Amino acid sequence: MKGVVFVNSKKSAYPESWYPLCHSSDLKKGEPLLIEAFDGKLILFRSEDGSPSVVSRFCPHMGTDLSKGTVIKGALRCPFHHRTYGKKGECLKVPGLHEKIKGPGLKNYPTIEKFGLIFMYLGQRPLFDFPSFPRVQRDADFSTALRKDLKTPYSSLLFNGFDTHHLTCIHNREIIAPPIMDSESPYHLRAAFSMKVLIERFYDIAVKFFGARVVDVTLDCWGGNFLIITNKRTKDNILITSVPRDQENSSFFLTTVTNKLEKGLFAEILQRLRLKLTTYLGMAFLKPDEVIVEEMRPDFRSLHPQQDLCVMKFWSFLDSLPKKSI
């Protein structure tokens, strides 16, 4: 069989980072879930304790598609020869052979469930911990994440957050002073700037009601795709996190995160409503970008060192990150 290639797939390499795969509610206990990501497909399932696992799609025995299998007592069972795999992808049982004989396992990825989403780390061992939020000091409260699927390369979504010039052209915001940029580690990039709301649209009125005419914003980016947006005048943090489906399609999730209240039921209800409204306002803010980035092909050879400084620094940061494929 030497030299025979059953599957010929060219997969791109992406930055090692924490990527959102789906909503927590999408993954039912006892059922495998097939997810398209990173120019391929992965299998998600819940182990017996309910924690999510992400493993490679095909059984290493004969290449059976494990999305057609079953989950029994928290173990993924191949539909063909009933080999079973544990939450770390290890082979637990080979029917018909001595119980001590185990077959090869599945490729497994570090996984965490946070903010109503299931994240995986693209790599064997995380180079950095799952990012924390600057002002969330205890248990977090969060809104249901909104998801958007776009026909655009992954890189088009990445640099958009650091393109401060487009905030003036598309979103009618005036950048008051040049952004201040720094980093906490090789896997982190921060930009802080102030912007003024220029036009009195419904969205702008709502922004000023919850914030102010001048908004002080900090962007904390981890791993190139995990973006935390902090408005200094509010208690909330907006999380925008994205994942490449293939070389032409990407998805992003947006949610709002804040400290969990220790007060009464009425205060909790008001906070839930505020978080939900902030999330919908965040999506409304991004609406003009969605049409523009569709089928966009970024070309950074003509960037201006003054006008596009943030984009240039972000692209340099992204280029420096270690890359992996599934």
Image: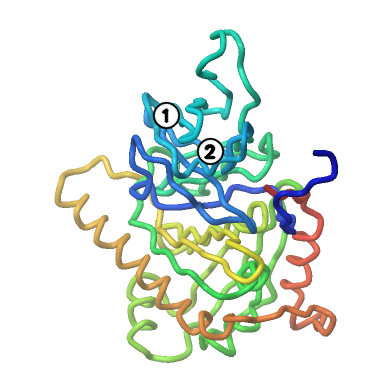
> In which quadrant is the N terminus drawn?
top right
Circle 1: is it few (<14), some (14-19), or many (20+) Cα within 10 Å? Answer: many
Q: Is residue 249 left or right of residue 46?
A: right
167, above or below 90, in the image = below
Mark 2 or mark 1, which is nearer the start of the sequence? 1
Q: What residue sits right under mark 2 in the picture?
A: 111
Residue matched to label 1: 47
Where residue 163 sits, quadrant-wise, is: bottom right
Instruction: Choose between 6 and 16: the one closer to the eye.
Output: 6
Relative height, residue 120 to residue 276 (above, below): above
Structural distance between the alpha carbons of marks 1 and 2: 12 Å
Amino acid type assigned to the residue bearing label 2 in the image: Thr
Q: Position of residue 13 (x, y in %)?
A: 74, 55
Viewer-side residue, 61 vs 49? 61
**Mark seen at residue 314:** none
Residue found at x 65% / y 45%? 122
Disc 1 element? loop
Coloring basis for residues: rainbow
> Looking at the rendering, which quadrant does residue 192 occupy?
bottom right
Residue 8, position in %: x, y? 73, 56
Measured as percent of width and height from the top left, residue 82 is found at 47, 27
Residue found at x 80% / y 82%: 303
Q: Across the whole image, how many numbered discs are drawn on residues?
A: 2
Q: Position of residue 248 (x, y in %)?
A: 63, 71
| Pointer 1 with pointer 2, Cβ within 8 A | no
Task: Establish if 268 lies above or below 206.
Answer: above
- Of badges 1 and 2, the one in the foreground is 1
In this orientation, does residue 132 appear? no
Residue, x 39% and y 83% (percent of image)? 204
Q: Amino acid at mark 1?
A: Ser
